[in-house]
Amino acid sequence: MNMNYLLCGVGGQGTVLAAKVLAAAAIAKGEEVKTTETIGMAQRGGSVTSYVRTGYGIHSPIIPLGTADVIIGFEPGEVVRNLKYLKKGGTVVVSTKSVMPVTAALTNSTYNGEEMVEYIKKAAENVIIIDGEKLCNECGSDKVLNVILLGAAIKSGAVGITLEETKDALLKRLPAKLHDLNIKALELGMRG
Amino acid sequence: MPEQLVMGNEAIAFGAIKAGVKMVAGYPGTPSTEVLETIAKNNNGNIHVEWSINEKAALEVGAGAAYAGARTLVTMKQVGLNVASDPLMSLNYVGVKGGMVILVADDPGPISSQTEQDTRHYAKFAKMMVFDPSSPKEAYEMIQDAFEYSEKYGEPVFMRPTTRICHGYQTIELSTEAEEREVEGFVKDSDRWVIFPKLSYNNHIKLEKKLVEISEDFNTYRFNTVTGKGTKGIIASGVGYEYVKEVVGDREDIKIFKVATANPFPEKLALEFLEGLDSVLAMEELDPVLEREITYVCGKYNVNAKVYGKLTGHVVNAGELSADKAAESIAEFLGEENVFAANQISAEGAPELPARPPVLCPGCPHRASFYAVKVAMKGKKTRYCGDIGCYTLGNAMPLDMVDTCLCMGAGLTMAQGFAHAEEDVYSFGFIGDSTFFASGMTGVVNAVYNQANITIVLLDNSTTAMTGHQPHPGTGRTMMGDVVNCVDPEMILKGMGVKTVVTADPLDLENAVEVVKKTAEEKGVKAIIFKSPCIAVTKPAQREVIDEDKCINCKKCIKELGCPAIVLKDGKAFIEKSMCFGCSVCETVCPVQAISKAGGDK
Ligand SMILES: Cc1ncc(C[n+]2csc(CCOP(=O)(O)OP(=O)(O)O)c2C)c(N)n1
Ligand code: SF4
Ligand code: SF4
């Protein structure tokens, strides 16, 4: 089955690894994959969006508007920015913790994540809200948000790959000493 | 090897290795950079790979190797070809012996470039073949074809991917075998290799004849195809073709002409496409090149089909294309509904989103350099000519230290223009180290010779940061893995006749300010080299903390520096531990010494 995933967040949050895992799990099943990223200029702190398309007869590397099956959002404002890509009836998995823009201190920005989450709940049908900060603390690492969100996405049943497939693809990409931590993060993500 | 996910630029690199490339030279530039880097990483030792100092040098190094019979790849971004255009416009007349592919990556958007220029115009201008892949997989095959065509006709050829091809990934089955090829060696022949007006005239005649032959050849080129039937047709190329396919799917009632070679245009195949059509839509990134070609063919052969596209306002004529934009244009063209519109969620009532503009990293030495000049020159009439690199971001608030930015190398020379035109100003030219080697040095000689009254500020961060931290002559590392003598900008400047050349550490802010104050007052050409590594090529120092009791909440650190590690927490300045690089510049800026190195933990 063809699937379109959109992963979005802020530079440094690990969106790209999560995208690679989704892609690898699909490749292991013998599917074709196209992915691409949009990253602003090289510096840290900008918006990052990864598009992953799996299945057969895929053309555009970027998902057309209104065709994403799943949005995995690492930051609520970034999800709002990309909601136009979600198809009607698609699923959003979103971490509630907002990341202030690096220029916030200068511009007196009043950006707040709660307002974003409220809007997402209203605009999309299937929304899974994850307290990413709390679950990261439970794991004892702020580097596993990506894996927690993958776990939550699998649990939702909206992604086309299983827990086992994800585990395989994930552990292949990580050094052995990080395996336990990441399995724990996957499980916590599935618990929600 | 089984199918794996490969980046377009990697696919091009592996295709070139497979084709037996012997010489690879280029200059970094997004989105082209990973092609050369991938070849260097997978070099079995048989390939010479180099970052040349600029694109002109790369093309000329490549020309030598190709004259000797080696298969040669030269890589650059689109604006790089402007720099390399001088050798290019003669090389086409002379031709090559070993296959030569000039890979030029175009950047619709533009996403990380100063222009939206279209390299296919250069192909027409220089009367050269151009190959335009529509996917990473095709790019892998096409670069191999490109070498074949180059050798078949004895001409250099362009390969012109765009950002979505270069940086898109696709599952591809790669071969890691490299074709074994002998390099015959140079054969002296002045009638062939030494360009003179007579040779140019003769070769011009030959070149025009060749173009007709190649156009004929391209009618059957495997990646130029005509499919479907009916009275409506779409002509498309590159990723634009994939967008069209995304919209029309497997529909058979629309004719599609996929053009992989915009120059020379496959005219016969175009006629086959036009057969039975009453209207044509052109879908291509950047300029309406195919659109003009097909319009020309209609006129030439008296075909009565109406051509729609950018020239008629039916396709956007600036910025990147997308499947969505293609869907809009195609819906209008066919008089049908937009295939993607039905399923979209309305954006009504969406809250305002935060902007996330690019900024200099926490601890970036450029921040300190700009700040030092700003403080030193406060209240004086100044002109700050910037240049291209991470340091262009010195334009952002609160530094606001870039008055102009034009193209690589222009900072130093434009500063001279200001100095001659406005005698009462302090004119500064800022330039990065990689940019200095690429195109700054000639500007220095110009200033010395023509007695300009300028201050050169060389921002030496020991890397080419903007394009992903490539080595350059000042770093002493090569793409062959060798460690060589560093080329020293201080010696270059002195050797060129700059009398005052001061090297200073910008992170020692107080001294840096003094150096600027003193140096800027001298007459003539003087230079300050601010030397401190980019944070990507060095280790962090002990981070800083703000002592809440000492802090008087003046927010000077935030308002003056704009370091992303200093945030507002409960209305007060606070240093985000995970982001601080410990450059200590904020420590100097704080008027009450509330900021100091954290004890113990880093
Ligand atoms: C003619 C041309 N070639 C290549 C580029 C791509 N490019 C942008 S900035 C840059 C060099 C930046 O290095 P440096 O001057 O050392 O500044 P830094 O980014 O390290 O601050 C390059 C090669 C370009 N813009 N123009
Ligand atoms: S990458 Fe290096 S040069 Fe560029 S902004 Fe960051 S620290 Fe500065
Ligand atoms: S917080 Fe201060 S010491 Fe840390 S990176 Fe920013 S300016 Fe440098």
Image: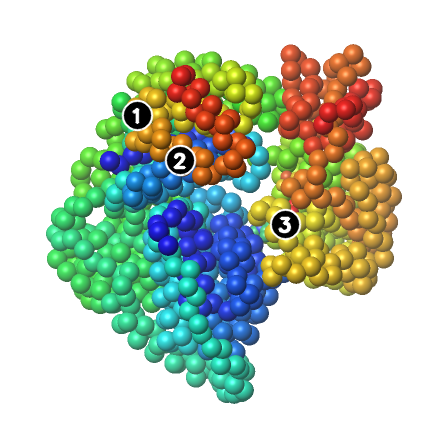
Say few, some or many: other residues with alpha carbon within 10 Å of mark 3 (under 14 / 14 to 19 / 20 or more): many
> Which amino acid does the dot numbered 3 rest on?
Thr
Do the residues at discs 1 and 2 belong to one chain? yes
Q: Which residue is mark 3?
A: B464
Q: Nearer the viewer, residue B43 or B68?
A: B43
> Which amino acid does the dot numbered 2 rest on?
Asp
Q: Secondary structure at mark 2?
A: helix
| Residue B166 x, y percent position in the rendering | 43, 50
| Residue B113 x, y percent position in the rendering | 52, 47
The nearer-to-camera label among 1 and 2 is: 2
Chain name for mark 2: A
Image position of A101 with respect to A63: above or below = above
Label count reads 3
Q: Is residue A132 visible?
A: yes
Q: Residue at x 38, y 59 (%)?
A: B175
| Residue A140 x, y percent position in the rendering | 56, 21
> Which amino acid does the dot numbered 1 rest on?
Ala
Say few, some or many: other residues with alpha carbon within 10 Å of mark 2 (under 14 / 14 to 19 / 20 or more): some
Say few, some or many: other residues with alpha carbon within 10 Å of mark 1 (under 14 / 14 to 19 / 20 or more): some
Q: Is mark 2 within 8 Å of ligand 2?
A: no
Q: Relative to B77, is B168 on the left or the right?
A: left
Q: Quadrant of ligand 2?
A: top right
Do the residues at discs 3 and 1 belong to one chain? no
Q: Is mark 3 within 8 Å of ligand 1?
A: yes
The quadrant of the picture occupied by the N terminus of chain B is bottom left
Q: Relative to B496, is B20 on the left or the right?
A: left
The nearer-to-camera label among 3 and 1 is: 1
Between the C-alphas of marks 1 and 2, the distance is 19 Å
The nearer-to-camera label among 2 and 3 is: 2
Q: Which residue is mark 2?
A: A168
